[in-house]
Amino acid sequence: MKSITLFGHTVFRGQSACFRAPVTELVDGTVVTVPVMVKVGASDGPTVLLSGAIHGDEYHGPSAIPALMKGISVDELSGILIGIPIMNPLSYFTKERVASLDYEHLNLNRIWPGDPNGFVSLRLAAKLFEEVVLKADFIFDHHEGGIDFLADYIILGGTAETRAKVGTIQRQMAKWFGTLPVFDSTTDAAAVRLGRAGALSEAAGSRGIPVIGIEIGGAGTVWPEWMDRSVAGSRRILQGLKLLEGEPEPQPGHQYFCPRAAWPRPSHGGLLRPLSAAKMHAVVDGGTPLAEVLDPFGNVVETLVAPFRSVIMDTRFIATVMPGDWTYHCGEIVE
């Protein structure tokens, strides 16, 4: 493995590079780029892609990916690291989950591998998929809770066929990362209806490229202590994959692997008032009250409860809710 070529830039063994790669244009012809960071190690090994900001209101990737890349020298690296902190500049510009600049307001993490002849987001996905995704052996896909939520868990995914190909290594990567709860799910018919068959974990995983989703942070800000934990966990995965020397150090605490999850959803609009049980990583029994919905007069019109024995993986940060909104992400605990 003497070099890698990305977007026409070739980086050779023992070298690092940072550059901007053109991926599309705005309505006035202004060129839109993605930032690309590359390190080609002094020794051979796997290629790992670090992807961030597939959703433009998520700042975990833009903060953690450069920190991880800058903390690794090519001399200690066996293999190649590719970092793209902002995969979706179209939604990053507008601080939105989806790309409102796109005619169809498409969600990039529902349309992989894209279409080179489609709408602008589909073309963006196709270019990124061809130029970087297919050149990776493993992918660390950085997400978070966005503006509305705080998240702190690992997500694995894909159809049954994809999980048969990459599920074992996905679970091992999650264990190396640390003791965060793991949503260890298989894409079912309901998830397909929501477009999750077009997630990066499925599009890459179906081609034998394992993806681990690192969901840390949210609420529209950068949390330095959580970013540091993300970097440390990612380094442990790199050790496990033999890109870095050493063995991943086991982390204290129990790690839950949740085969399914649910979000209690309100039937009424109002102000969401969390109760004492609604805390990140809290373990609650089925039926435990998590929050109350208040009308404008301060009356409780609904109480939301945990659907089953759960560990809390996301908490809602925005106080107002409409009927059907996500509130608290409950990962089922199976003893």
Image (cartoon, rainbow, N blue to C red):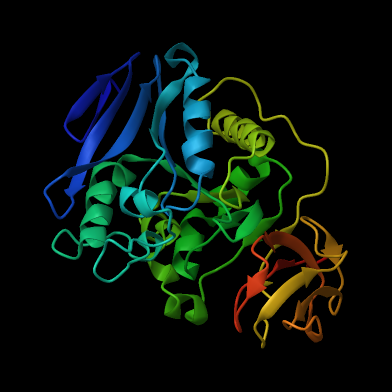
Q: Nearer the viewer, residue 23 or 72?
A: 23
| Among the 4 quarters of the image, the one containing residue 198 | bottom left
Q: Where residue 153 sits: x, y (%)? A: 66, 52
Is residue 330 left or right of 241 when viewed as pictured? Answer: right
Name the residue at 67% across, 87% down: 268
Q: How many marks?
A: 0
Q: Where residue 21 sits: x, y (%)? A: 23, 36
Q: Nearer the viewer, residue 317 or 252?
A: 317
Looking at the rendering, in which quadrant would you find the C terminus?
A: bottom right
Is residue 105 left or right of 214 when viewed as pictured? Answer: left
- Residue ranking furthest to the front: 297
Question: Is residue 307 visible in the rendered structure shown here?
Answer: no
Name the residue at 71% across, 48% down: 180
* Residue 26 sits above or below residue 158 on the image: above
Looking at the rendering, in which quadrant would you find the N terminus?
A: top left
Name the residue at 77% across, 84% down: 297
Q: Where residue 219 sits: x, y (%)? A: 60, 53
| Among the 4 quarters of the image, the one containing residue 162 | bottom left
Q: Nearer the viewer, residue 173 or 196?
A: 196
Name the residue at 48% across, 50% down: 211
* Residue 231 sits above or below residue 308 on the image: above
Is residue 250 left or right of 134 when viewed as pictured? Answer: right
Question: Is residue 71 visible in the rendered structure shown here?
Answer: yes
Is residue 55 left or right of 314 when viewed as pictured? Answer: left
| Among the 4 quarters of the image, the one containing residue 16 | top left
Q: Where residue 112 sits: x, y (%)? A: 33, 60
